[in-house]
Image (cartoon, rainbow, N blue to C red):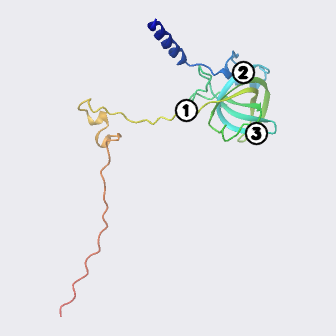
Amino acid sequence: MSRRLLWIVIGALALGGCATIPKPLEGNYPPVSLDAARAGTAQGTRVRWGGEIIQTTPREEQTCFTVLAEPLDSQARPQRGEDSLGRFVACKQGFYDPEVFAKGRELTVTGNLEGTIQQKVGQYDYTYPKVAADTVYLWPKRPLYAAVPYYDPFWGPCDPFWCGWGPWGWGPWYYPPRVIVVPRSPPPPPPPPKG
């Protein structure tokens, strides 16, 4: 009996650890490209798009987000480091604070395509697909990881060229020699004349 309970707990933990889409973003969405939306061939279609916030603009009754679109992963989260798919604008009723929905944060929206709008990007007139959003999901910030070189002291002797020792090294164990600059003292004054 206790063994069966143990397997149930292990199974629940394994399923809980799987990547799942957050509830507000669940659903089936047809694959609609930004190019099709810009051409106006997908108006009214429901989409789930995401990316990095470029700008958050609160207006009188709604807030509009200008987003640099990125492909979504299995959780519907924007995939960092992927090539951008273009830009889109998503507007939702209500006030969303630009300090919270700040530039660079990751956002996923769901809603209906509602035509396009023209805005300038520098001197270029850019056509943005517009999403009338019913869900705006701000992802938590990703943790920062510092890249620390790894050195195993038990690995044994190592060629300095391959291991990074010596003056060719980049590891934390190598420090350049300390150079001490001593100012030259002035020459001593001549002895007083004897006389």
Of the residues shown, which amino acid type is indicated by label 1? Arg
The answer for how far apart the CA atoms under marks 1 and 3 are is 25 Å
Query: In the rendered image of this protein, does residue 96 appear above or below residue 42?
Result: below
Query: In the rendered image of this protein, does residue 86 appear above or below residue 186?
Result: above
Q: Furthest-bottom residue in view?
A: 195
Instruction: Tell me the crowding category of disc 3: few under 14, some 14 to 19, or many 20 or more residues within 10 angstroms, Cα based.
Output: some
- Of tags 2 and 1, the one toward the viewer is 1
Q: Secondary structure at mark 2?
A: strand
Instruction: Give the residue number, with chain letter if any, for mark 1.
Output: 142
Quarter of the picture holding the C terminus: bottom left
Q: Furthest-front residue in view?
A: 1
Residue sitting at x 54%, y 14%? 15
Residue sitting at x 66%, y 35%? 53
5 vs 186, nearest the viewer? 5
- Counting labels gives 3
Residue 134 in percent (x, y) is at: 75, 25
Of mark 1 and mark 3, the one earlier in the sequence is 3
Tag on residue 58? Answer: 3
Tag on residue 47? Answer: 2
Left or right of residue 183: residue 37: right
